[in-house]
Image: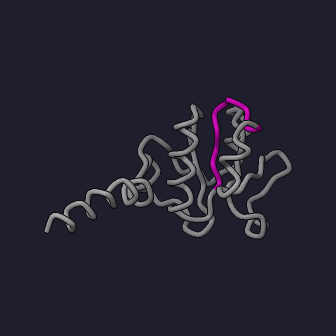
């Protein structure tokens, strides 16, 4: 019984980091709003997935390389492009821990819903 309790306690931080929703960011589908707000667009999808929704102005650093290359990201407001919710959650938690202000995001596999526009 004690081993089971210790196992559950050790898995809680991992499950929280991967699956608990992140609050305080808005889902934005319209890319025109980003250029008026002077935001940096950060694409954390894999290199082979970034064919759609990519611009020349965006910074492309896949999540697997984010720990190594986060120093190349300017300290301005960020708009995050991720492929799914798991990648978004991991990426935003890492960037906030490093001091970045992620104010909006866009998911390519599942578009924004009205419920998520207030931040999930």
Q: Position of residue 116 (x, y in %)?
A: 44, 54
Label tally: 0
Quadrant of residue 64 in the image?
bottom right
Q: Position of residue 90 (x, y in %)?
A: 52, 54
Q: Nearer the viewer, residue 14 or 86?
A: 14
Residue at the image point whose x is 68% and y is 29% from the top: 75
Q: Is residue 10 left or right of residue 50?
A: left
Q: Nearer the viewer, residue 18 or 88?
A: 18
Q: Is residue 74 shown in magenta?
A: yes
Q: Is residue 113 left or right of residue 105?
A: left
Give the farthest residue toward the left: 1
Give the farthest residue toward the front: 3
Question: Which corner quadrant holds the N terminus?
Answer: bottom left
Q: Nearer the viewer, residue 101 or 111?
A: 101
Q: Position of residue 24 (x, y in %)?
A: 44, 40
| Magenta segment | 72-81
Q: Position of residue 91 (x, y in %)?
A: 57, 51
Q: Nearer the viewer, residue 64 or 46?
A: 64
Q: How is the image coloured?
A: one colour
Residue at the image point whose x is 55% and y is 67% from the top: 110
Q: Is residue 103 left or right of residue 49?
A: left
Quadrant of residue 17 in the image?
bottom left
Residue at the image point whose x is 77% and y is 38% from the top: 72
Residue at the image point whose x is 53% and y is 38% from the top: 96
């Amino acid at each position: 019984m004690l081993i089971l309790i210790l196992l559950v306690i050790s898995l809680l931080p991992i499950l929280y980091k991967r699956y608990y929703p992140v609050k305080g960011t808005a889902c934005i589908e319209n890319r025109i709003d980003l250029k008026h707000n002077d935001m940096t667009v950060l694409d954390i999808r894999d290199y082979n997935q970034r064919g759609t929704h990519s611009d020349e102005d965006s910074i492309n650093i896949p999540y697997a390389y984010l720990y190594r290359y986060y120093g190349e990201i300017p300290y301005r407001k960020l708009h995050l492009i991720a492929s799914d919710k798991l990648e978004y959650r991991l990426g935003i938690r890492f960037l906030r821990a490093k001091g970045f202000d992620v104010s909006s995001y866009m998911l390519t596999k599942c578009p924004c819903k009205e419920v998520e526009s207030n931040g999930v």
